[in-house]
Image: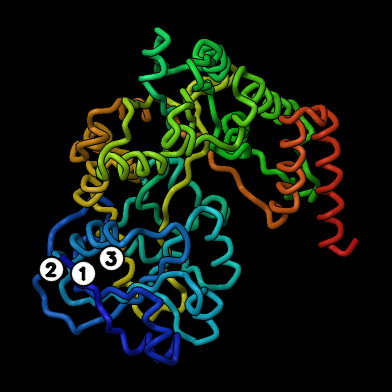
């Protein structure tokens, strides 16, 4: 077990200039190592002696908890590479990316998500890993394609800027007690959104002083839209917003239909507390991270309800395709003086042996495209293994689409007008046309036109 470290004097001096400031960074230290096969799925150790090496492991975006870091990084890398020390720095006040750059203290490894890689690349901080991958026999074809293919968003010549180590997933969580109370059949795998809406009507009931809501939606509309199309909100060629179309009309109508269900006026964009704490929501389509909240409460004395999960609802016009579930990624900093060692650490994290640990924990999906890993998902998780966890593999992640730097300019009016649609103060056609006009005006303003 890795002890909490108060060390890292180099990071202490450069980042904060004082012991008090450094204490906020939450550093860990551990042994790791070097050399050996760095291809995905490799394992084994390195008996050669090496000079000690310190790597700065920066939790920039989509990082890990302390427990995850200890289990998925420390324990696997320590066995294979026992001579590298990892200083973990979390993205917080005093240790933002801007702070690190200003101090001239660069990370060696960075946790990133799909779109933050673009920010790192624009800063000139993302190393193109093609040469390292070739030198180390790294096999990128072993990864789930939708996860590894996010690199196509960062270049068009097969570049490799980030390596997925795990992935998000989606599910339809449901309260079995509510369905049992009213004698309604449980949700089943493979349901469409239309079928879920119809099922919701059957459990929209009032029992005594308790009103039961049928369905809440917690996944952002942009990701639900990805079930229909990977097109970005802004056309990268014309720099024009492009959401006044049939796909977005379908999404807006779905969100309004959810809210218009009986007992469901607060259905869109809410539901976690009502599902878990109040236990008055029958169904909740959500990310896999919500399962962590359910498991935490189980460990703290139980949720007090009989819940389960099934596959995320899909559209009848694109069956079997769920929201674009992005990867958790790692990148090597272009300013690192230890790129080879950094690459080897990442390779150890994505070895099949370590991916099996991640899969059996049931908190995140493994990044490797491997049937054995899928079959063992949540096998070591006493809460999740009793649930219908294999349902999450019955819906495939949609293709992960690109984002331009104008994403927020377009998304802001789109989300604002969606709220107006679901509360009945604006019709769908007007909402999309108005949002597109606002987005284009914002883009033109930024472009100085």
Q: Is residue 103 above or below residue 58?
A: below
Q: Nearer the viewer, residue 225 or 383?
A: 383
Tag 3 secondary structure: helix
Position of residue 444 measured from the top left corner of the image (x, y, whole percent): 86, 56
Few, some or many C-alpha atoms within 10 Å of disc 2 (few <14, some 14-19, many ≥20)? some
Residue marked by disc 3: 345
Marks 1 & 2, CB-CB < 8 Å contact: yes
Residue lying furthest right in this view? 449
Marks 3 and 2 sit apart, C-alpha to C-alpha, by: 13 Å
Residue drawn at the location 52% of the way across and 14% of the way down? 205
Q: What label sits on residue 46 in the rendered view? A: 2
Residue drawn at the location 44% of the way across and 72% of the way down? 333
Say which quarter of the image contains residue 177.
top left
Marks 3 & 2, CB-CB < 8 Å contact: no
Residue marked by disc 1: 35
Residue drawn at the location 60% of the way across and 24% of the way down? 264
Nearest-to-viewer mark from 1 and 3: 3
Position of residue 441 measured from the top left corner of the image (x, y, whole percent): 87, 52
Tag 2 secondary structure: loop
Q: Nearer the viewer, residue 297 or 329?
A: 297
Marks 1 and 2 sit apart, C-alpha to C-alpha, by: 7 Å
Q: Is residue 169 above or below residue 187?
A: below
Looking at the rendered image, the quarter that the C terminus falls into is: bottom right
Say which quarter of the image contains residue 383.
top left
User: Which callout, 1 or 3, points at the residue further toward the start of the chain?
Assistant: 1
Q: Nearer the viewer, residue 108 or 216?
A: 216
Marks 1 and 3 sit apart, C-alpha to C-alpha, by: 10 Å
Position of residue 416 measured from the top left corner of the image (x, y, whole percent): 74, 43
Residue 40 appears left or right of 183:
left
Residue drawn at the location 19% of the way across and 68% of the way down? 2
Which color scheme did the rendering employ for the protein?
Answer: rainbow
């Amino acid at each position: 077990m890795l002890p909490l470290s108060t060390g890292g004097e180099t990071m202490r001096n450069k980042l904060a200039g004082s012991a008090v400031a450094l204490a906020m960074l939450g550093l860990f230290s551990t042994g790791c190592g070097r050399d050996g096969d760095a291809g995905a799925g490799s394992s084994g150790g390195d008996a050669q002696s090496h000079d000690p090496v310190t790597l700065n492991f920066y939790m920039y975006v989509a990082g890990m908890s302390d427990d995850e870091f200890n289990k998925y990084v420390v324990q696997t890398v320590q066995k294979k590479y026992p001579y590298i020390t990892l200083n973990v720095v979390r993205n917080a006040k005093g240790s933002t990316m801007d702070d690190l750059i200003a101090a001239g203290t660069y990370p060696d490894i960075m946790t990133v998500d799909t779109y933050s890689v673009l920010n790192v690349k624009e800063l000139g901080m993302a190393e193109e890993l093609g040469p390292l991958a070739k030198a180390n026999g790294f096999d990128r074809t072993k990864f789930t394609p939708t996860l590894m293919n996010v690199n196509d968003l960062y270049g068009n010549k097969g570049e490799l800027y980030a390596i997925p180590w795990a992935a998000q997933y989606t599910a339809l969580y449901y309260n079995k007690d509510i369905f049992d109370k009213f004698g309604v059949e449980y949700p089943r795998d493979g349901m469409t959104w239309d079928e879920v809406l119809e099922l919701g009507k059957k459990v929209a009931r009032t029992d005594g002083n308790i009103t039961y809501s049928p369905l809440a939606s917690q996944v952002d509309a942009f990701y639900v839209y990805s079930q229909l199309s990977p097109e970005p909100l802004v056309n990268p060629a014309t720099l024009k917003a492009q959401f006044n179309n049939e796909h977005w009309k379908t999404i807006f109508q779905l969100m309004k239909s959810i809210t218009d269900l009986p007992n469901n006026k607060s259905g869109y964009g809410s539901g976690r507390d009502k599902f878990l704490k109040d236990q008055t929501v029958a169904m909740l389509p959500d990310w896999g991270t919500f399962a962590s909240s359910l498991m935490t409460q189980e460990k703290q004395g139980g949720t007090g309800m009989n819940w389960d999960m099934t596959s995320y609802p899909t559209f009848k016009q694109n069956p079997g395709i769920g929201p674009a579930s992005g990867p958790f990624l790692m990148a090597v900093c272009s300013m690192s003086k230890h790129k080879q060692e950094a690459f080897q650490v990442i390779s150890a994290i994505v070895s099949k042996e370590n991916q099996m640990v991640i899969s059996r924990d049931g908190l995140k999906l493994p990044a490797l495209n491997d049937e054995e890993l899928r079959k063992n998902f949540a096998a070591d998780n006493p809460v999740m293994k009793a649930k219908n966890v294999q349902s999450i593999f019955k819906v495939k992640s949609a293709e992960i689409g690109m984002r331009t730097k104008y994403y927020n300019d377009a998304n802001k009016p789109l989300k604002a007008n969606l709220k107006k649609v679901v509360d009945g103060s604006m019709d769908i056609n007007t909402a999309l046309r108005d949002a597109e006009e606002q987005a284009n005006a914002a883009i033109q303003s930024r472009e100085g036109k």
